[in-house]
Amino acid sequence: MTSKNPDQGAFWQQHVDAQKISGLSRRAYSLEHGLKEHQLIYYIGRCEKRASSKSAFAKVVVSEPPEQAPVKEFVVRLIFNSKIVLEVGTGTDPEWIAQLINYVGCQQ
């Protein structure tokens, strides 16, 4: 808030902030603090206008995602007695494959 007297600007800014926090009406706050209500209203308007005209910037950093090796899809084909063919790709649980092989082996 620009003012001929910097202390006056700080004085009113403190009262504007305190009035908002107090929960009191502008009239009640003015009476309690010995202020003229119309002056408080004037400075509230100035503070709101000043706050809305401020620009804020945030630093934004843009970066490329890290390069990743291409994922190769491996397929494993298991053939049991020429009757059962099982194809599994990457991401298949090895324990499940072992259990399946064990089960199929026991069925023969």
Image (tube, grey):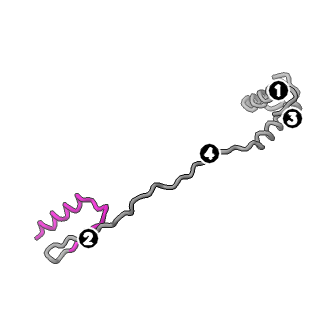
Amino acid type, mark 1: Pro
In the picture, the quarter occupied by the C terminus is: bottom left
Do residues under tags 2 and 3 come within 8 Å of each other at their CB atoms? no
Camera sees residue 28: no
- Find disc 4 in the rendering and name its residue: 59
- Identify which residue is drawn at 82% across, 32% down: 26
Amino acid, disc 4: Lys
Which quadrant holds the N terminus? top right
Q: In this view, does 3 lie above or below 56?
A: above
Q: Pointer 1: what residue?
A: 6
Q: Does the magenta-highlighted stretch encompass residue 96?
A: yes
Give the alpha-carbon distance from disc 1 to disc 3, as whole Å.
17 Å
Height in image: 67 above or below 32? Answer: below
Residue at 33% x, 67% y is: 73
Residue 45 point in image, percent of width and height: 83, 38
Residue under label 2, please give it.
Answer: 87
Residue contact between numbered discs 1 and 4, judged by CB atoms under 8 Å: no
Query: Closer to the N terminus: mark 4 or mark 3?
Result: 3
Q: Distance between the residues labelled 2 and 3?
A: 79 Å
> In the image, what residue type sits under mark 3?
Tyr
Which of discs 1 and 2 lies nearer the camera? The answer is 1
Which of disc 3 and disc 1 is earlier in sequence? 1
Instruction: Point out the frontmost of discs 4 and 3.
Output: 4
Q: How crowded is mark 3: few (under 14 residues within 10 Å), some or many (20 or more)?
A: few
The magenta segment: 85-108
Give the residue type that dot 2 points to: Glu
Counting residues from the start of the chain, the first of labels 1 and 2 encountered is 1
- SS type, badge 3: helix
**Residue 95 in view of the camera:** yes
According to the picture, the residue beneath numbered tag 3 turns out to be: 42
Q: How many marks?
A: 4
